[in-house]
């Protein structure tokens, strides 16, 4: 793989953004790198956009953890395949994918990623782990991919059906995976609160993950509200990669400006605001979580477009290093 450098215009934007922030804040300055290190643990935030609506400049939620050269994908929002391609990733070498929860902005790019892996003529199994709903999602995507798979086998360019290459797994909590590089622990977080009688009640869950390697421990909150389980999971971690959502007044104003707010009923509007406040991490809650867990550094992701001015609220509660993620940044 070859090194990828930031375009000059993008570099200048990052530099200007860093200069505009208070001195106590630090933006990770690492440029996108295509080198897969032989040793050590790296985190690359592939996609940092929040919410279900795609944007031009940023991909939706996805991360890459590289440990001793092995690649672990955490979430697969829309744009994940293009981000990995820009990184110079060998798709054939992706063995394990972890999904935090089955919202579309965390899974919308999974089909494209599976296609890219399969089209490298991958023959060995790729495992996709996640909470209930993961196996069903993978099964549905495989039905779509099977058409292309049968065509490629028929034209002689492939020999293995896609159904033999991918396997989706609904996991429980606790230790869900371990290999020579990492141990992965999952907890259920507070992103889902479904009322009795709803289609998802008792059926779907949302997870946060901790990856423990020899040199670093990294926790990905995924989407969550305040959660004792996540705080316990993150205790003493070297890096906490946490979502940051904007305060409710800002969120409502953005929805009104976009024209989407007016399309929802009063009941839907009320549910959206409740979901935003109770099932995501507002700035003060992120700071409290990081402080309670006593993590060494905090990376903010799953961001809206006006996040910088909310970071000071995080710093009121957490005195450690706060880093603001952008697509294709390494930590």
Image (cartoon, helix red, strand yellow):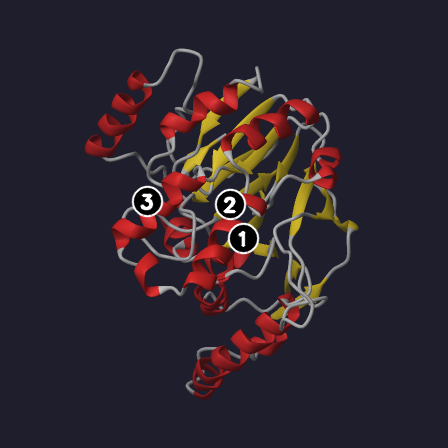
Q: Distance between the residues labelled 3 and 2?
A: 29 Å
Q: How far is the residue under mark 1 from the one under mark 2? A: 6 Å
In the picture as drawn, the residue positioned furthest to the left comes out as: 9
Q: Measured along the vertical axis of the image, is residue 254 above or below residue 54?
A: above
Q: At x 45% / y 49%, what residue is drawn?
A: 89
| Numbered disc total | 3
Residue under circle 2?
Answer: 63
Residue designated by label 3: 253
Which residue is labeled 1 in the image? 75
Give whichever of 108, 199 is nearer the camera: 199
Q: What element carries label 1?
A: strand
Q: Which comes sooner in the sequence, label 3 or label 2?
A: 2
The x and y percentages for residue 263 are 32, 65
Image coordinates for residue 159, horizontal then vertical, percent: 54, 79
The numbered mark, 1 or 2, whose residue comes first in the sequence reads: 2
Tell me if mark 3 has few (under 14), some (14-19) or many (20+) residues whose alpha carbon lies within 10 angstroms of its own.
few
Frontmost residue, 68 versus 229:
229
Residue at horizontal 24 percent and vertical 33 percent from the top = 10
Give x and y (percent) for residue 184. 72, 45
| Depicted 228 relative to depicted 159: above or below | above
> Can residue 37 be seen at all in this image of the molecule?
no
Say whether disc 1 or disc 3 marks the residue closer to the N-terminus.
Answer: 1
Do tag 1 and tag 2 residues touch (Cβ < 8 Å)? Answer: yes
Residue 174: where, in percent of width, then height?
80, 48
The one of 263 and 172 positioned closer to us in this rendering: 263
Q: Quadrant of residue 166?
A: bottom right
Please report the residue visible at 47 percent of the width from the left and 25 percent of the height from the top. 323
Q: Is residue 45 visible?
A: yes
């Amino acid at each position: 793989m070859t090194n990828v450098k930031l375009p000059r215009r993008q570099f200048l934007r990052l530099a200007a953004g860093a200069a505009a922030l208070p001195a106590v804040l630090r933006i990770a300055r690492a440029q996108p790198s295509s080198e897969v290190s032989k040793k050590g643990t790296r985190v690359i935030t592939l996609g940092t956009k929040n919410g279900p609506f795609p944007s031009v400049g940023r991909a939706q939620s996805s991360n890459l953890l590289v440990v001793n050269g092995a690649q672990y994908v955490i979430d697969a929002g829309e744009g994940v395949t293009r981000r990995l391609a820009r990184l110079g990733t060998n798709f054939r070498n992706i063995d394990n994918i972890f999904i935090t929860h089955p919202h579309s902005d965390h899974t919308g790019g999974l089909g494209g990623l599976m296609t890219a892996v399969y089209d490298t003529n991958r023959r060995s199994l790729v495992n996709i782990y996640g909470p209930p709903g993961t196996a069903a999602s993978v099964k549905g995507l495989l039905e779509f991919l099977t058409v292309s798979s049968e065509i490629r086998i028929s034209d002689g360019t492939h020999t293995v059906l896609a159904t033999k290459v991918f396997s989706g797994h609904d996991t429980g909590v606790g230790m869900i995976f371990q290999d020579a590089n990492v141990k992965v622990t999952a907890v259920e977080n507070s992103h889902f609160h479904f009322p009795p009688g709803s289609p998802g009640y008792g059926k779907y869950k949302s997870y946060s993950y901790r990856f423990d390697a020899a040199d670093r421990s990294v926790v990905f909150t995924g989407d969550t509200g305040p959660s004792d389980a996540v705080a316990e999971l993150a205790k003493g971690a070297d890096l906490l990669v946490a979502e940051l959502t904007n305060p409710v007044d800002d969120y409502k104003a953005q929805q009104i400006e976009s024209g989407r707010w007016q399309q929802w009923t009063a009941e839907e509007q009320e549910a959206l605001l409740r979901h935003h406040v109770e099932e995501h991490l507002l700035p003060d809650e992120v700071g409290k979580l990081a402080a309670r867990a006593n993590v060494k550094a905090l990376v903010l992701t799953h961001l809206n477009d006006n996040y910088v001015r909310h970071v000071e609220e995080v710093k009121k509660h957490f005195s450690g290093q706060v880093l603001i993620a952008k697509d294709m940044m390494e930590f």
